[in-house]
Image (spheres, rainbow, N blue to C red):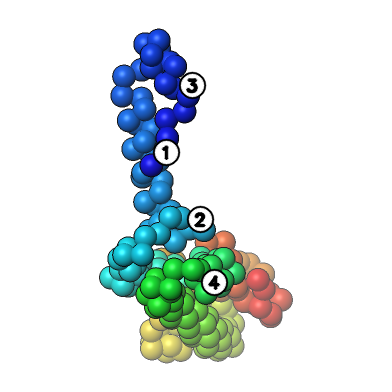
């Protein structure tokens, strides 16, 4: 607990200190110290009997990360930033902390986060490979359609069922997971979102090559 400065004592004696202000300052200081201690911040006062960081919280936050960054958007950038922060900023502090009784649970929670990040990266890479393979199949189907009818399809659904059994999703994510098709006079463009929200990969039939 922080000590009341001399200036505050003088102002209190003169009746110039707002009632309750010093109590608010003490409450804020207690709150900041609690947050710093719960996060294991450098310099936090940690008592020898302080309870270990909760595993359930780490599991819950890891599940949110996988859902948000791996399944909803399929991006992976957030996970990479978190991994960098954990390995560069958090791991050295845990290893060299003088509070030995908290080292093992903190390392355990760190491992939980890193496993979740690895799951996200695996999902992102799998979806990227899957989208590329499915896009190649659609490009072949569109070229076959053009070869037979001397024109490009007006929409991807025109390929079904003669040239494709169905139009699959580009990736197994919840947001922006569809192939998009833009008919043009020179040649259509088939594209999909490779890196949300703005990264696009597409095949330009007029130039007969992939573009990003």
Q: Is residue 76 visible?
A: no
Label 1: which secondary element: loop
Q: CA distance from mark 3 to mark 2?
A: 27 Å
Label 2: which secondary element: loop
Residue on which disc 1 sits: 2
Foreground disc of the pair 4, 1? 1
Q: Which mark is residue 43?
A: 2
Label 3: which secondary element: helix
Q: Is residue 171 left or right of residue 207?
A: left
Q: Residue at x 51, y 55 (%)?
A: 43
Quadrant of the rendered image containing residue 12: top left
Q: Residue at x 43, y 88 (%)?
A: 164
- Mark 1, residues whose alpha carbon is within 10 Å: few (<14), some, or many (≥20)? few
Position of residue 150 measured from the top left corner of the image (x, y, whole percent): 59, 82
Residue on which disc 4 sits: 96
Q: Which residue is nearer to you in this view: 83 or 24?
A: 24
Quarter of the image with the C terminus is bottom right
**Contact, CB < 8 Å: mark 3 with mark 4?**
no
Q: Is residue 209 left or right of residue 18?
A: right
- Mark 3, residues whose alpha carbon is within 10 Å: few (<14), some, or many (≥20)? few
């Amino acid at each position: 607990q922080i000590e009341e400065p001399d200036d505050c004592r003088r102002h209190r004696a003169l009746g110039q200190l707002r009632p309750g202000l010093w109590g608010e300052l003490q409450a804020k200081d207690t709150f900041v110290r609690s947050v710093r201690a719960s996060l294991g911040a450098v310099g936090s006062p940690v008592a020898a009997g302080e309870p270990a960081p909760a595993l359930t919280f780490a599991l819950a936050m890891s599940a949110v990360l996988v859902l948000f960054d791996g399944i909803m958007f399929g991006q992976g950038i957030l996970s990479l930033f978190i991994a960098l922060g954990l390995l560069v900023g958090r791991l050295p502090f845990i290893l060299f902390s003088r509070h030995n009784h908290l080292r093992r649970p903190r390392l355990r929670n760190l491992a939980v986060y890193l496993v979740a990040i690895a799951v996200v990266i695996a999902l992102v890479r799998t979806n990227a490979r899957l989208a590329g393979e499915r896009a190649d199949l659609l490009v072949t189907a569109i070229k076959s359609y053009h070869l037979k009818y001397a024109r490009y399809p007006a929409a991807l659904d025109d390929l079904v069922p003669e040239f494709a059994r169905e139009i699959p999703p580009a990736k197994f994510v919840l947001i922006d997971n569809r192939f998009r098709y833009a008919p043009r006079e020179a040649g259509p463009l088939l594209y999909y979102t490779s890196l949300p929200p703005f990264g696009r990969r597409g095949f330009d039939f007029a130039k007969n090559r992939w573009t990003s």
